[in-house]
Amino acid sequence: MESSRDDHRASASQIMRELLSRTPERQNKAMRIGICGAPGAGKSSVIEKLGVDIVNHGKRLAVLAVDPSS
């Protein structure tokens, strides 16, 4: 999603459209949050704390984590 290549951005947009289309009753309520940063910046910690808070508020959560270096 961070790529500046047009073909990558088009693929990422298509993936997000397909994911959202699988939850039509929630489509207008779904949120996408992107978290990026340098190694060791605390991304995983932020995701964990945010995720726990979301679940504690009775919401459903899915996390898609991608390591572009692997």
Image (tube, rainbow, N blue to C red):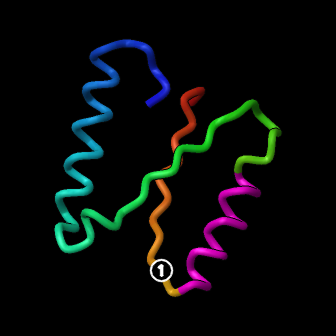
16 relative position to 65: left or right: left
Residue 55 within the magenta-colored segment of the rendering = yes
Compared with 70, 20 (above or below) is below
Task: Identify whether 20 is placed above or below 7.
Answer: below
Give residue 3's quadrant in the image. top left
Residue under the image location 60 percent in, 43 percent down = 35
Question: Is 16 colored magenta in this rendering?
Answer: no
Q: Residue at x 34, y 67 (%)?
A: 29
**Residue 67 appears in which quarter of the rendering?**
top right
Q: Residue furthest top?
A: 5
Q: Which residue is mark 1?
A: 59
Residue at 22% from the left image edge and 46% from the top image edge: 17
Which sits in the foreground, 51 or 25?
25
| Pointer 1 local density, CA inside 10 Å: few below 14, some 14–19, many at least 20 | few
63 left or right of 52 in image: left
Say whether residue 19 is left or right of residue 62: left
> Is the C terminus in the top left, top right, bottom left or bottom right quadrant?
top right
